[in-house]
Image (cartoon, rainbow, N blue to C red):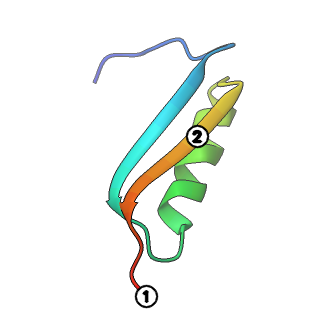
């Protein structure tokens, strides 16, 4: 996989369904650790 410099960048994460938010939280932690300034999560659906 190619390496990407995330320092100072904003990142949008997209998923089809969010249930607990754990995957988004883990992704946000990893992206922030890689230098991203802002991480935004967008999901198309949330189960009732």
Tell which of 24 and 17 is nearer to you.
17
Position of residue 3 relative to residue 19, above or below, is: above
Within 10 Å of disc 1 (Cα), the crowding (few <14, some 14-19, many 20+) is few
Q: Is mark 2 on a helix, strand or loop?
A: strand
Position of residue 44 relative to residue 6, above or below, is: below
Position of residue 11 relative to residue 6, above or below, is: below
Position of residue 46 relative to residue 23, above or below, is: below
Q: For marks 1 and 2, give the one nearer the viewer.
A: 1
Q: Name the residue under label 1.
A: 48
Residue 19 percent across, percent down from the top left = 45, 76
Q: Mark 2 points at which residue?
A: 40
Residue 6 percent across, percent down from the top left = 57, 17
Residue 39 percent across, percent down from the top left = 62, 36
Tell which of 30 and 10 is nearer to you.
10
Q: In which quarter of the image is residue 48?
A: bottom left
Query: In which quadrant of the rendered image does the N terminus lie?
Result: top left
Tell which of 27 and 10 is nearer to you.
10
Between the residue at mark 1 and the residue at mark 2, the CA separation in whole angstroms equals 22 Å
- In the displayed orientation, state which residue is furthest to the bottom: 48
Residue 10 percent across, percent down from the top left = 60, 22
* Mark positioned earlier in the residue sequence (1 or 2): 2
Q: Is mark 1 on a helix, strand or loop?
A: loop
Tell which of 19 and 27 is nearer to you.
19
Identify the residue at image location x=71%, y=24%: 37
Identify the residue at image location x=65%, y=46%: 29
Within 10 Å of disc 2 (Cα), the crowding (few <14, some 14-19, many 20+) is few
Identify the residue at image location x=52%, y=76%: 20
């Amino acid at each position: 996989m190619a390496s990407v410099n995330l320092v100072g960048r904003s990142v949008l994460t997209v998923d089809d369904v969010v249930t607990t938010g754990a995957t988004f939280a883990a992704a946000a932690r990893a992206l922030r650790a890689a230098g991203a300034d802002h991480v935004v999560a967008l999901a198309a659906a949330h189960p009732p």
